[in-house]
Image: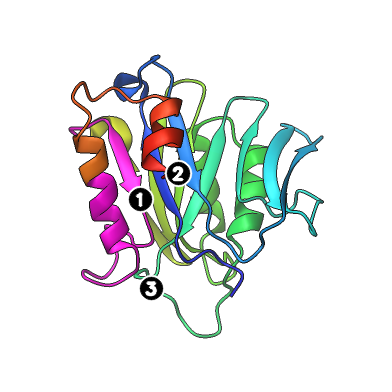
Amino acid sequence: DARADECSTAIITSAASADARPILWKNRDTDHLANMVVFVSEAPYSYLGIVDADDPSGRRVWVGLNAAGFAIMNTVAYNLPKKPGEAEDLEGVIMADALRLCRTVDDFESYIKRNKGRALGSQANFGVIDAAGGAAVFEVHNNGYKRLNAAEQPEKYLLITNFSRSGEAGKGRGLVRFDRLTELFRAKADAKYSVEDVLETFAR
């Protein structure tokens, strides 16, 4: 399975950020140890994306940012519905499409609404932010989704591992990692988070 089993991520709103700019963090766990950053010239939006080094086209992206300030990442959610015979493992394609097409978090929601169905190929949480301050998680399976807005959470951030809040309770993966992330975030006295906090504390 080429999908990551142990991704840990966070969507931090500007209200919870030390420099008032949102942060999108993804710790990528993958069997593809050789990764690279590519620039893809596209319309309406060009984008930067992290890809597998042996797949440099930019048509499958695992986290990225486009020219409009829209950014996206994902984690697999093992407790979302999955029907036999439907498309799967297309999250990288979905994210490349979103980077090419979307300016805002709302644009991404419209994209999911247009494309949901047996051919979508998703069983994942997508974290997205935009230049207007939008920040949300979309818990997406082929035939439905749930949107969680980070600004509506008491902490003004959302932590994600490999389960969805809207999925089957008690199932999925990364429950212990989620608890540890929650503990680390809550331990910060001022509840204002920086990129340095992510790299030097949470990611370790």
Q: Quadrant of residue 151?
A: top left
Q: Nearer the viewer, residue 133 or 76?
A: 76
Question: Which residue matches tag 3?
Answer: 81
Say if residue 204 shows up in the picture.
yes
Residue 114 in picture, x, y percent from top left: 55, 52
Residue furthest to the top in view is 19
Q: Amino acid at mark 3?
A: Pro
Q: Nearer the viewer, residue 35 or 41?
A: 35
Judge left or right: residue 57 versus residue 191: right
Q: Nearer the viewer, residue 25 or 147?
A: 25
The earlier-in-sequence mark between 2 and 3 is: 3
Magenta region, residue range: 154-182
Which element carries disc 1, helix, strand or loop? strand
Question: Which residue matches tag 1?
Answer: 160
Which element carries disc 2, helix, strand or loop? strand
Judge left or right: residue 30 versus residue 57: left
Say above or below: 121 vs 96. below
Q: Amino acid at mark 1?
A: Ile
Disc assigned to residue 127: 2
Q: Report how far apart the C-alphas of labels 3 and 1 lie in the structure.
A: 18 Å
| Residue contact between numbered discs 3 and 1, judged by CB atoms under 8 Å | no
Q: Report how far apart the C-alphas of labels 2 and 3 lie in the structure.
A: 19 Å
> Dot 3, crowdedness within 10 Å: few (<14), some or many (≥20)?
some
Q: Quadrant of the N terminus?
A: bottom right
